[in-house]
Image (cartoon, rainbow, N blue to C red):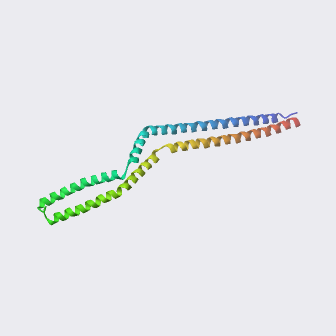
Amino acid sequence: MPDPVTGITAGTALLGAKMSSDASKKASGAANRAQAAELDFQQQRYDDWKDVFGPIQDNLSEYYSNLDAKYFETVGIQNFEEERAMAEKNMTENLAQRGITDSGLSASLDRDMALDSASRRATIRQEAPMMVAKEKMNFLQVGNSTNPSESMVGSLSRRTQNTADTARSVGMQAGADISSAINTTGTALADYFGG
């Protein structure tokens, strides 16, 4: 007479394989929903960033693209000349208060100021191209550090990898469970009919 335990064992193995497959599918679905939520969040973040910074980024890009050494030279010399004129005025007033405006000291100070002024203007002109490069580099660094597209790419990459890993894992587990169920069922049937 066939052993009822053998039939129960075969049924339990098939039920276990089905439950394992269902649990694996449920876990895969939960992982996919979590990844979809992360992707939606990153997409919203990216869209918000573009809404806020897109036009600003375009305007700044245009500004920095058109930036040239002549701008820095002009602004630098203009600022320098304003400061020089103020310093010269203060010096002249100071000399006048002391009654030495037409002295050799006054002429010497004027000559020194003229030489210093020429030297400073030359330095401003020399440094202007480097200032342009520095400003453009700063703009590039700000753009790279605030753009969330890398987060978006990372989310997409992780989602793709996780989906592939989950699919591979589900397939391997389902195959193992079905193989085990077939072996158990085959053994149980052989025992049932053979015994």
In the rendered image of this protein, does residue 11 appear above or below residue 107? above
Residue plotted at (29% across, 59% down): 120
The image quarter containing residue 174 is: top right
In the shown orientation, is residue 115 left or right of residue 180? left
Answer yes or no: is residue 94 visible: yes
The picture places residue 182, in percent across and down from the top left corner, at 79, 38
In this view, the residue in front, 113 or 140, is: 113
In the rendered image of this protein, does residue 190 appear above or below residue 78? above
Residue plotted at (30% across, 53% down): 76
Residue plotted at (13% across, 64% down): 103
In the shown orientation, is residue 92 left or right of residue 126? left
Residue plotted at (49% across, 39% down): 46
On-image quarter of the C terminus:
top right
Residue most toward the left? 99
Residue most toward the bottom? 104
On-image quarter of the N terminus:
top right
In the shown orientation, is residue 175 left or right of residue 132? right
The image quarter containing residue 110 is: bottom left
- Looking at the rendered structure, the number of numbered marks drawn on it comes to 0
In this view, the residue in front, 19 or 5, is: 19
The picture places residue 33, in percent across and down from the top left corner, at 58, 36
Answer yes or no: is residue 195 visible: no
The image quarter containing residue 154 is: top right
The picture places residue 24, in percent across and down from the top left corner, at 67, 38
The picture places residue 111, in percent across and down from the top left corner, at 21, 63
